[in-house]
Amino acid sequence: MIKTLARRIELAERVAAGRSKFSEDCICFPGPEPPSFTSNEEQEAAHCIKCRLHGDRFQKHFHLYLAPWRIERIAMEWKNRNAQYKKAWLASGLPPLGSDPGQ
């Protein structure tokens, strides 16, 4: 019974590894979670860095104004972002959202 369970776990791990959408070298933002920049300057800085595998990492969206409450909410959402989103954000050379820029 234990051998059967171990084989089932091993098979499930192999299947899960094969389903990974992003490779370790990919620094693209995940599709369902487009990046939330607080300024056009942040977006431009991030857009200059290309993924070695896919080129452009996201589609640019221009915004004229973000309310202060929206900027705060973007910073609060950082802790709930998935690992690929955080990897793509940090690859942009931008500080983690919600962190103090003076640190």
Image (cartoon, rainbow, N blue to C red):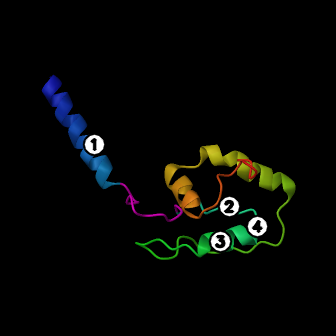
Q: For the point 43% across and 64% down, which residue is it?
A: 26
Look at the numbered discs 4 and 1 and tell me whether their residues touch, using CB distance below 8 Å. no
Disc ID at residue 39: 4
Which amino acid is tagged 3?
Answer: Ala
Label disc, if present, on residue 13 of the rendered structure: 1
Q: Which label sits in the foreground, 3 or 4?
A: 3
Q: Is residue 29 magenta?
A: yes
Count of residue discs:
4
Q: Calculate the distance from the C-alpha at mark 2 to the C-alpha at mark 3.
A: 13 Å
Q: CA distance from mark 1 to mark 3?
A: 37 Å
Compare marks 2 and 1 and give the one earlier in the sequence.
1
Q: Which quarter shows the N terminus?
A: top left
Which residue position holds label 2? 36
Residue type at mark 1 is: Glu
- Tell me which residue sits at (13%, 27%) in the image: 3
Mark 2–mark 4 Cα distance, whole angstroms, equals 9 Å
Q: Quadrant of residue 40?
A: bottom right
Q: Going 54% across and 63% down the picture, which residue do you hit?
A: 29
Residue 79 in the image: state x and y as whole percent. 63, 43
